[in-house]
Amino acid sequence: MSSQDKLIIFDTTLRDGEQSPGASMTRDEKVRIAKALERMRVDVIEAGFPIASPGDFAAVQAVARAVSDSTVCGLARALDKDIDRAGEALKPAVSGRIHTFIATSPIHMKMKLRMEPQQVIEQAVRAVKRARQYTDNVEFSPEDAGRSETDFLCRVLEAVIEAGANTVNIPDTVGYNLPHQFGELIRTLIERVPNSDKAVFSVHCHNDLGLAVGNSLSAVLNGARQVECTINGLGERAGNAALEEVVMSVQTRQDIFPCKTDLDTTRIMTCSRLVSGITGFAVQPNKAIVGANAFAHESGIHQDGVLKSRETYEIMRAQDVGWAANRIVLGKHSGRNAFRTRLKDLGIEFDSEEELNNAFSRFKDLADKKHEIFDEDLQALVTESGQESGNEWLKLVALKVCSETGETPHADVTLWLDGEEQQVSCSGSGPVDASFKAIEALVNSGTELELYSVNNITSGTDSQGEVTVRLNLDGRIVNGQGADTDIVIASAKAYINAVNKIIQPESRAHPQLGDV
Ligand code: KIV
Ligand code: ZN
């Protein structure tokens, strides 16, 4: 494919996606998502903002070590210390990119940076030159480009390309643009920046008006050849352009788009479920491509039409994005090999035999309770085992709840805590409330419960419930997950998982706001 025919997919789920309030991910979770993105053949994975915290630095470094087929990118403000930190974190990468940015809109320059436009250009150029000392793959973003003056943007872009930026990314940071306007901006920039042929033009659109995908596609029609996006459209405020929507639009409307992506779209559902499981951000049922109803036909007329000819009401094939009908894949008698092979098909591989054994023994426990194990069950099971590092401070040993009409529910909880088993009983407004109170009575974490949600993984009353618990400790937010056919046990597991994470001190700063 020539560079004009190829649309580069830059995934920023691990960086901008993580900026969604509450969507924090641990280093290991980031590595698992990065590996899934790599398998889907995403071109560039933005793994984090290394200066933000030691945890972010370690996550970018870990992703750089784990991924070899995609380029791994680290974000840096246009400051020496940020760029040095990003350069350091990306050292292990087979292919690494530094993405540096500074704001260019009048409001950001005046109110936030308190800098004159000429100073902004100088700082941008200096940043790109410094980044080039670490890698020849440098991306520059004029933050809030969507509200910047076009003449000024042209000057900035010409200067950074001259300084060595080979990708220039135009962010609609606050999601203000309309598709025709944003497309026009991209076309104008490509036409007017004298050295525009020396760089790939990229776009990064936010979804404040629900236009992130529309704006990104309009930009592609006007010459952009990289789109920055996230799985399930996760991201700051209303989110970023959803990767699955951008990619499937381009693939489905090849009569309109003059370019293609390299993605293996059959991996989309696996990535979507993985990200939603880890972050606890459920996908709305009517979400395009990955929502539970995206390929469901409810009305009789539609069902009749689809049965006669699928194309009457479907513009894409469900299997092309990785939807397999709820197929029974494994059961009680399936062996380790069948388990490993099925997970491999789902894009899940284990780093060690120990991890495989751990997941397999959970699978056997589940198969005892639930006879038909679906792909979704396997994914939840792996999410759960992947979250356990083996040296948890806190573990659930036993849980007994009593809930009876007319009686106050109570829970007896036994935990492994501080190297010994400890037991407590508490009552509450329901069995989940009583269980959480009992766990808190023993661990005294001082956290606030921000979110409690239960989703059924498959259909039927024997389905596993997948619970997400979000805890806040002095502004630090973590998500815990648990899955079980018993939702009270799933809830207790999720709570314990979140407590285990919150005791690892890793605070994180925000790239667009404040000082680091
Ligand atoms: O939205 C934005 O402007 C960003 C930049 C850092 C690219 O996320
Ligand atoms: Zn952004």
Image: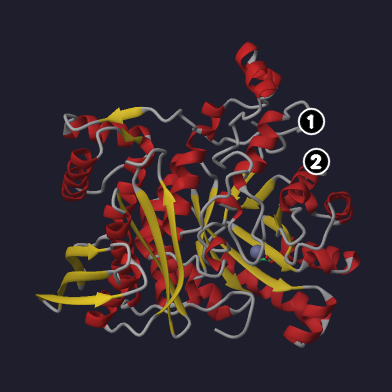
Amino acid type at mark 2:
Leu
- CA neighbours of label 2 inside 10 A, class few (<14), some (14 to 19), many (20+): some
Q: Quadrant of the C terminus?
A: bottom right
Q: Are marks 2 and 1 in contact (CB under 8 Å)?
A: yes
491 or 172: nearer the viewer? 491
Q: Residue at x 10, y 76 (%)?
A: 419
> Which circle marks residue 221 in the picture?
2
Question: Can the viewer see residue 391?
Answer: no
Mark 2 to mark 1 CA distance (whole Å): 8 Å
> Which circle marks residue 486 in the picture?
none
Read off the residue under disc 1: 256
- Looking at the image, residue 69 sits to the left or right of residue 369; the answer is right
* Residue 432, quarter of picture: bottom left
Residue 131 in the image, given as x and y percentages of width and height: 58, 68
User: Which one is earlier in the sequence, the residue at label 2 or at label 1?
Assistant: 2
Residue 459 in the image, given as x and y percentages of width and height: 42, 38
* Residue 510, quarter of picture: bottom right
Q: Quadrant of ligand 1?
A: bottom right
Outermost residue to the front? 406
- Looking at the image, residue 43 sits to the left or right of residue 481; the answer is right
Q: Quadrant of the N terminus?
A: top right
* Color theme of the render: secondary structure
Helix, strand or loop at mark 1:
loop
Residue 294 in the image, given as x and y percentages of width and height: 60, 36
Q: Residue at x 73, y 84 (%)?
A: 113
- Looking at the image, residue 391 sits to the left or right of residue 64; the answer is left
Q: Residue at x 70, y 19 (%)?
A: 312
Amino acid type at mark 1:
Ile
Rendered view: 155 above or below 197: below
